[in-house]
Image (tube, rainbow, N blue to C red):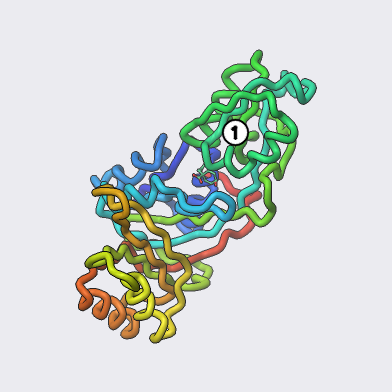
């Protein structure tokens, strides 16, 4: 049976591009969902074999909704990662494309996309009212349904094609080198033609108690074993101010004797360790020819 891949939709989101890349080597059934929690819940209850969602952006940082749902709401392992380039475009209805800059009155997009372009918007379109959408493609689709409005969406080139929009300007993010890290969750990833660049294990660590050097003690277990950490992020446990989980990404397979040793040592201090997944990491090929 073909795998069913849930992703943050509708068609034409960055997540859709990432999902097409990750599953480009075999036939799959792609299933769009309106929100990140919907994707994760669909995988959790077995409606999809896999899910693809964003987890971190180079400009804006962590996608907290993804982290919080992975920790608190669902029990689905991370099985793969894809780093994908993000080119934000200003998309408008073709019948409005000749407007002056001052004439645009609304910008619609996903909060992460708006945040990545905030300097550009302040500089060029200070008058626009911001409206948030569940995804960049949802915003593009809304602009396409309102041909008489002076509205812009921020989104992908693919969304311009799919929803018949005009690209007013491309690369409008405030910093170049814009990349988002997407993760696949659910069943193990089918084999891909390209080998992974690296292997990571994501851990969620809860400290035993709050004392000077508690986090240092945890980090030291990785340091003396020379295990490289690629990320550490704290998220509230939601039990009170000052209580955190630490999400630690280690550049090593879960079964490696050094990582097993590190986890055992951290647990011996009384900390709780949950393995969120151990997975291959890929980088995107060109996104030009993607469509499914
Ligand atoms: O709205 C989309 O197109 C998405 O795929 C979501 C998302 C995100 O949540 O970070 C993905 C990549 C970009 O950073 C902007 C938005």
Residue 161 appears in which quarter of the rendering?
Answer: top right
Residue 195 visible to the viewer: no
Q: Position of residue 273 (x, y in %)?
A: 26, 67
Does 214 sit above or below residue 110? Answer: below
Does 1 sit above or below residue 12? Answer: below
Residue 179 visible to the viewer: yes
Q: Nearer the viewer, residue 83 or 115?
A: 115
Asked if disc 1 is less than 8 Å from ligand 1, the answer is no
The residue that appears at 55% across and 36% down in the rendered structure is 136
Q: Nearer the viewer, residue 214 or 9?
A: 214
Q: Position of residue 259 (x, y in %)?
A: 33, 79
Q: Which residue position is annotated with label 1? A: 162
Left or right for 141, reference 274: right
As drawn, the residue found furthest toward the front would be 212
The residue that appears at 34% across and 49% down in the rendered structure is 68
For mark 1, give the secondary structure.
Answer: helix
Specify few, some or many for label 1: CA neighbours under 10 Å numbering under 14, 14-19, or 20 or more. Answer: some
The residue that appears at 68% across and 46% down in the rendered structure is 174
The residue that appears at 41% across and 72% down in the rendered structure is 250
Q: Position of residue 227 (x, y in %)?
A: 42, 80
Q: Nearer the viewer, residue 20 or 177?
A: 177
**Total marks in image:** 1
Does 260 sit above or below residue 16? Answer: below
Left or right for 205, reference 159: left
Residue 106 appears in which quarter of the rendering?
Answer: top right
Does 274 sit above or below residue 172? Answer: below
Q: Position of residue 203 (x, y in %)?
A: 33, 66
């Amino acid at each position: 049976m073909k795998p069913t891949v849930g992703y943050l939709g509708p068609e034409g989101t960055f997540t859709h591009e990432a999902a097409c890349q990750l599953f480009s080597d075999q036939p799959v059934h792609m299933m769009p969902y309106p929100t990140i929690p919907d994707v994760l819940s669909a995988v959790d209850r077995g409606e999809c074999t896999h899910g693809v969602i964003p987890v971190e952006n180079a400009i804006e940082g962590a996608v907290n909704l993804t982290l919080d749902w992975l920790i608190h709401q669902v029990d689905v392992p991370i099985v793969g990662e894809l780093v994908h380039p993000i080119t934000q475009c200003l998309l408008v209805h073709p019948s409005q494309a000749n407007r002056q800059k001052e004439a645009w009155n609304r910008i619609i997009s996903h909060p992460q996309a708006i945040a990545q372009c905030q300097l550009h918007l302040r500089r060029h379109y200070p008058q626009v009212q911001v409206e948030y959408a569940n995804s960049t493609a949802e915003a593009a689709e809304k602009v396409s349904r309102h041909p008489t409005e002076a509205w812009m969406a921020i989104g992908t080139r693919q969304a311009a094609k799919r929803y018949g929009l005009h690209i007013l300007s491309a690369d409008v993010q405030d910093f170049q080198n814009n990349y988002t890290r997407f993760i696949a969750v659910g069943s193990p990833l089918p084999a891909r033609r390209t080998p992974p660049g690296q292997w990571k294990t994501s851990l969620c660590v809860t400290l035993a108690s709050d004392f000077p050097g508690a986090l240092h003690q945890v980090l030291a277990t990785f340091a003396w074993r020379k295990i490289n950490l690629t990320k550490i992020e704290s998220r509230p446990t939601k039990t009170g101010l000052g209580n955190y989980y630490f999400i630690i990404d280690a550049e090593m397979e879960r079964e490696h004797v050094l990582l097993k040793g590190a986890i055992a040592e951290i647990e011996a201090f009384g900390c709780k360790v949950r393995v969120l997944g151990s997975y291959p990491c890929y980088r995107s090929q060109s996104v030009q020819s993607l469509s499914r």
